[in-house]
Image (cartoon, rainbow, N blue to C red):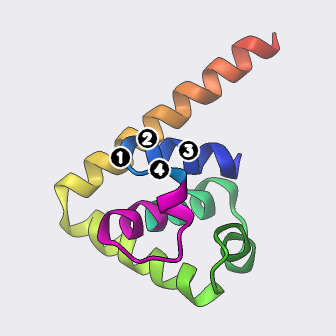
Amino acid sequence: MKEQIATVVCDVCGVTQDQMFSPRRHRKAFMARSLAMYLIRDLLNVSSPFIASFFNRDHSTVLNAMNVVQKNLETSEDYRVMHRKCMEALADLNAKTRMLAQ
């Protein structure tokens, strides 16, 4: 599921998987990666070290991402729209997966 979340965030944010998992810190990739970390934590209820290992980062990077995303969700309508689009895409994906399983 973490891979699906990363893929959806890449699609919504307009970045590639290579950009998201790159060690570079370009703003667009950083914001997408932070949002993916936040959603993985929120939806899967997994630890910071688990998320950090998936993104090949330190757990403190994940904690920083949580703070950045929370602040952006509170202050930026554009960021809230991006978050909502990711949640809707994940819900659609989940519904399709359930339909195929029947």
* Residue matched to label 4: 16
- Left or right: 1 with respect to 101? left
**Rounded to the nearest whole Å, what is the CA distance between mark 1 and mark 3?**
10 Å
Please report the residue visible at 40 percent of the width from the left and 70 percent of the height from the top.
Answer: 30
The extreme bottom residue here reads 60
- Left or right: 46 with respect to 20? right
Return the residue nearer the eye: 18 or 44: 18
Q: Is residue 26 magenta?
A: yes
Number of the label disc, if any, that sits on residue 7? 3
First to last magenta residue range: 18-33
Q: Amino acid at mark 4?
A: Thr
Of labels 4 and 3, earlier in sequence is 3
Q: Is residue 75 above or below residue 32?
A: below
Is disc 1 placed on a helix, strand or loop? loop
Q: Around disc 4, counting alpha carbons within 10 Å, would you say few (fewer than 14), some (14 to 19), or many (20 or more)?
A: some
Return the residue nearer the eye: 9 or 23: 23
